[in-house]
Image (cartoon, rainbow, N blue to C red):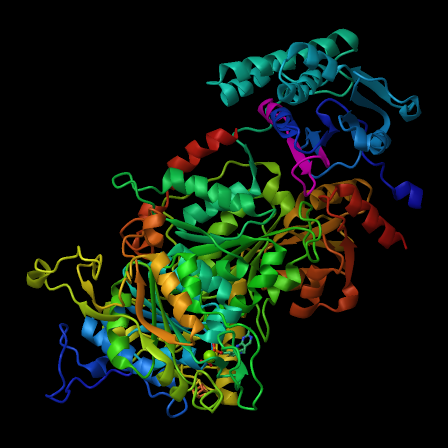
Amino acid sequence: MPSITKPVAAHPSLQRNELGLTIRDYEGSMSTLCAGCGHDSITAAIIRAFWEMSTPPHMIAKLSGIGCSSKTPTYFVGGAHGFNSAHGRMPSIATGAAAANRDLTYIGISGDGDSLSIGIGQMVHAIRRNVRLLYVIENNGVYGLTKGQFSASADVGSKSKRGEPNRMEPIDPVRMALSLGATFIARSFSGDKEQLVPILKAGIAHRGFALVDVISPCVTFNDHEGSTKSYLQTRKHLMQATETDFVPPAREILANISSEGSTSVTMHDGSVVNFRRVPEGYDPTDRSKVTAFLDHHMKTGEVVTGLLYLDESSQDMHELSNSTEVPLAHIPFETLCPGSKVLDEFQEEYR
Amino acid sequence: MHDVLRVPARNQPAVNDFALKLANVNGTGSASANGLLMQAIFRMGIPVTGKNLFPSNIQGLPTWYEIRVNKDGYGARALDYDLMVAMNSQTYVRDVREVRSGGYLMYDSSWPLDPELLRNDVTFLGVPLAKMCNESFAEPRERILMKNIAYAGALCAALDIDMGVVDELLGEKYGRKKALLDSNHKALKLGYNYTRDNFACPLPFHLAKMDANGDKILIDGNTATALGCLYAGATVAAWYPITPSTSVLDAFKALCEKYRRDPDTGKNNFMIIQAEDELSAIGMVLGANWNGARAFTSTAGPGISLMNELIGLAYYAEIPAVIIDVQRVGPSTGMPTRTQQGDVLLSAYASHGDTRHILLFPSSPAECFEFAVKSFDLAEHFQTPVLMLSDLDIGMNDWVIPRLKWDDSFRPDRGKVLTAEELQAMANYFRYSPEDQDHVAARTLPGVDSKGSFFIRGSGHNKLGGYTEIPDEYKEVMDRLKLKHQASAKYVPAPIIHNRPGARFGVLSSGGCDPAVREALDILEERGVPADYLRVRGFPFDKPVEEFLASHEFTFVVEQNRDAQLKALLTLETPVPKEKLRSVLVYGGFPLSARHVVDAILDQIEN
Ligand SMILES: Cc1ncc(C[n+]2csc(CCOP(=O)(O)OP(=O)(O)O)c2C)c(N)n1
Ligand code: SF4
Ligand SMILES: [Mg+2]
């Protein structure tokens, strides 16, 4: 759908970001999801995060797979290009897009079906390549768009709407990502914007693949009694492990912030992620400690949230491939084509 | 009648006109000896073709290499062998049988030959290769490797291959590795001297220097394809390893490392991604093309099968994509190291729903280069996937072709892409309107201007790009896509037509069939059966193809698959009545020979 240019005259009370844009400038078209769907709350958090980050809308690329969740990129940042791809294939398309233009900010929206079943291979390999991409799984434990089948994230014992229990072990994207060597791993809840927005901002700033698993109840197919991913059950079992602030790169302040303490991490663009509160003995930069912590708390059925792991020192796909700083898509043909003389010389080897 | 028309298999062998076949064991290092022979003959200025008939195996299975020398330049596979070099005891029985009556067989006489295998119409040349190598070399591995060079030496004597040229080639190859160079020379001499001293050398058919190769080159199609992608300005390549296409990416990587590294920063002006599978490889290609880079993937049939879903997405959402399919024998895993033209229909209509794609059919490494460049122009001009259908024979065998040329004034056709200024000057931007004379609408790239922002998708959309489920709106877009595909017929490489006076019928083929068909048509003409020839080079088919079919009483479609896929495509996509088309089908997996074509055509016109 073409973007509709927003009216320039905004209400004077609407705050403006560094680009002089209001939050309205980061909205998209009207949502067509069910009223109360968790995915809409995530959309709202994304809008806020990009606005607060003052990311120029045209420099954002939004990608998604297929599912209710994957429809949501139309509902935020209308001024950004979007790609609603095929079921489970967003990671590869985002990888190719990121390869072509390293200057854009990439956000990929997926569902638990899209990411943990049909697209699990692609997600795993995008993590492995450390593609610079904020990857949001809008996790509701079901296939919303195909009307309520269990997804691979459904918990053991969770009941379908018809009362059937799920018996298979769930795939936990957070612990999977930890074991895969992902460099930014977070979990949140669609109902907790306070927590989600700073996480998304840190994910946007992250140099590499930022996985954000957001529990996002499906009011139509998975919000009933017996479901472990209902609003009620999720709220009841939330365990907010870490609390973070995102401090944008403001030159004057920067000098004062220490990046040494284990509780604050300086991102490559100079912004800082401050771990305001972490559990006793927890270190969000120590993979084995985070793993042990999650293993322990998962057993008790708690939904552990927060920015759980962060490694800002690993190289992203472009650094790993030694690619040029200029977006590949912008290199002029004259530079790319070696010309007739080279072709002639080259063929001497084939004589 | 039949006997009068039937051609002899081939003329008697003569100087610069014969075929030899080398039977080896895979993984024993025979490839470098065989390559050396090919290259030496090529350097002697004599037209030559080499076909590597290799197994899907790393070590141990039989492998053959055929060399055909033909002063007139016929380059198709020969089916009868004047000289067999039988170096594989596993296939010995079969190899002895394949020598033509009156021919020669060279074998390793270190061990006695089973008398049952002798043929009295064949001359046996026993050279004690293993024995000589064991006496001259200490290392077991070296003994095995040098046995190959020793038979190359024996062939130099038997066929009068210019030793000066061979020395020169060895020097180029091992110049800096003195020890290796010495071993090679020693082995070469062992074979050469023994053969010269024990047999009447050279054999009645042998080589004599010519000047037929001018500034031609000897190159495989996959390297030429990679060169085309380099010259087209492709910056992103995503692939998953598969025979016989792997060497496209191997070559592309080597080329990029040489010619695409920024001299100042040492950074890469390219990215090659080895994907986790072909589903991802094509996804990456779509993502990169959507974002304005020229990106391609290279694969074989199994990869095309996997890519189907996203090929349809690219078609419907109108995203450029270049897909190189180096065809091999299907279905399923089939015979991965054997050649076929089995992906024609799959490629023409890849993906579910109404889809149709632009196809290019290169017939040689020269066209691999040319068409690879063309593929990117077509993909971007028409905002659609383009599949270039090469095959194992073209892709992995070395062919003698005219030197590749590049016009420095060439500028790519990047298609209709709006700039920020153009967008700013517009009242509104709609992705799929207005369309131009080719039924293409302008696209915009991410990162350029918010006014051009668009949410591209594979779901139903109307001509403005909005989501739709309304029948007329959906159909309007689908109908335009069909017209757009039709419009591309004028842009794909035109068919090559060769008419002959008195032709009674037409022959049509594509791709790697070409050398065999051209040779067959000359033979047929000599036999009093002239035929016109059309080689299609692209799909959709343009008027000349229709006219050719219409103007002949009947046309033989020569192709390398069981189901007459090209013929089927012609029936579906041109007005030609089915009855006017006949088939010549050769699909066992080895490259086509003129004899296949001549025999099949004669059989059918006589019956
Ligand atoms: C290849 C393919 N198979 C099946 C489907 C059908 N399909 C559409 S959405 C979906 C599941 C979506 O579930 P999820 O990713 O969890 O998203 P949600 O709707 O729950 O947000 C399925 C199976 C499809 N679109 N493509
Ligand atoms: S079906 Fe569920 S996931 Fe889909 S929109 Fe409705 S509430 Fe959301
Ligand atoms: Mg879901």
Where residue B329 sits in the image (x, y, percent)?
69, 52
Which residue is the extreme one toward the left?
A252
Q: Is residue A47 above or below residue A171?
A: below
- Residue found at x 30% / y 44%: B267
Where residue A347 sits in the image (x, y, percent)?
47, 33
User: Is residue A25 in view from this perspective?
Assistant: yes
Q: Is residue A198 above or below residue B345?
A: below
Closer-to-camera residue (B40/A184): A184
- Residue found at x 81% / y 23%: B105
Which part of the image, by quadrant, shows the N terminus of chain A?
Answer: bottom left
Where residue B47 sits in the image (x, y, percent)?
64, 30
**In the rendered view, does A76 fall on the left or right side of B177?**
left
Quadrant of residue B527 within the rendered picture:
top right
Closer-to-camera residue (A90/A275): A275
Magenta span contains residue B32: no
Magenta span covers which residues?
A: B39-64
